[in-house]
Amino acid sequence: MFFRTLLLLCLLTVSAPAGSYAASTSVSAAFIRDGFVWTKQGTTEVKISQGKPCTTPRWSPDGRWVAYLQGTSKQQLYVYDTKTRRTHTVYSGAASQIAWAPDQNTLAFQIGGVLNVSDISPDGPTPFRNVALAVDNYSWQPDGSGFLVSSSACLTPAGWTNPKLYTVPIDAKLDPKKVQLLYTLPNEISKDGATIQAIGTSSFKWSPDHSWIAFIVSPTASLSMDSDMLCIVSADGRTFRVIGEMLNSESWFAWAPSENRLGYIAGGGRYAFENKKLRLSSPTAVPSAPLTPNGYVDRDLEWISNTYLVVSRAKESKPFSNIITVPSSRLYGLTIPSGVARALTETPPNNASDIAPVYLPHSNQLAWQRVQGTQANVWLARPDGSASHVWINRIDAPSSYYGRSRNDDVLSLYERTEQAEQSTFLLP
């Protein structure tokens, strides 16, 4: 009996590392390599686009379709069917801001300031329908019934108007009677000595209970490079709060998975490696003290649980005149709310940086991009950093502006929940 038990324990020990690698088979990727869109499902990589450079791959909710933009001055919108391996045109003009509905294969996108939707069926996309005019930015409502949109402020002889937030049903069809005003933003927004003029907004992120909405308010384009404001508004539009100054980077703020706790990278100034500190806030509490130690900066936060998150952390530095130095970044796991941190990755060699952490909850994996120059590799590991390995070699590095990267321009991940494996890793 003793030897049978010992043999069983040995088998479990030997098979455990293989299970962590096998878990990647439940994850699919759409990524940009050499300007083209590729997919990886299981161990198979397939090139799905040709011709002009592409950007912004996006998986549909059911994992069948990949939407992407193609072109330079005028970006066309396409969807690729991974089952039939056929590509369909959704819009051949200049599209932008693409987003799938949370629970159905309906694709939203903008044509200038016009918000549109197209239903994507097994036969391909239906002709797109106009939803609303004069849209600055938008997000789907959590139930997929419509949108929260913002209109930007406009300059008039009497000064700037106020930006406004509206709720719009998916079947609005440009009918203003179906649009409801949620909140009118003030002309100026101030916090802790910093003041900006409110001109436009980012897209929107709902709290786990859908009672609060977080978003960034920005001034004019040139000023928004240096100072923006993170704000929240209640879902009924009755309460508005300014959380604090930060930059207009949507991967730098996020709600905890199931608590109304908001993490964000605070600090103004366009250079990402100076004065950028992780802080926490909530609708009923003042922001916490910075959780980033002196001499360091944080970027790209990702919640793993309500008490544990991951950031990309680097030593603080200053730009030298016109030369932008990029310190090497590595991933750290932080216990919340104490901020006690532990390095999850080693310092990457050759001045590479670990950025853009993404948590895959069903297989309990952490994905990230290790960027070096114009290329990157996609890595996978457990949330504690163990069993780390390269999953995808050589994707295009995301474009960077003073150290801020648009990470989702080059990579989109989809997790097939029915194939998720049970993990033995316990979150702290």
Image (spheres, rainbow, N blue to C red):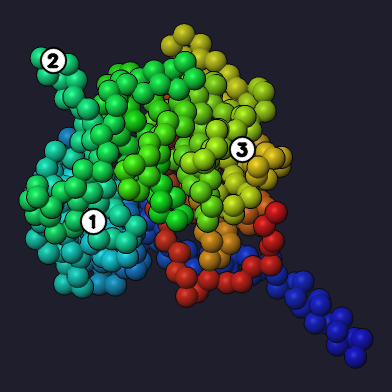
The C terminus is located in which quarter? bottom right
Answer with the quarter of the image where residue 4 lies.
bottom right
Q: Looking at the picture, which amino acid does disc 3 mark?
A: Arg
Mark positioned earlier in the residue sequence (2 or 1): 1
Q: Give me the residue at 18% from left, 57% from top.
A: 170
Foreground residue among 19 and 393: 19
Which residue position holds label 2? 158
Pair 2/1: label in front: 2
- Is label 1 in contact with label 3 (beta carbons under 8 Å)? no
Q: Looking at the picture, which amino acid does disc 1 mark?
A: Gly
Q: Give me the residue at 32% from left, 51% from top.
A: 57
Pair 1/3: label in front: 1
- Is label 2 in contact with label 1 (beta carbons under 8 Å)? no
* Residue with the most extreme front position: 238
Q: Residues within 10 Å of mark 1 (few under 14, many from 20)?
A: some
Which residue position holds label 1? 146
Where disc 1 sits, the SS reads: strand
Determine the CA span between mark 2 and mark 1: 34 Å
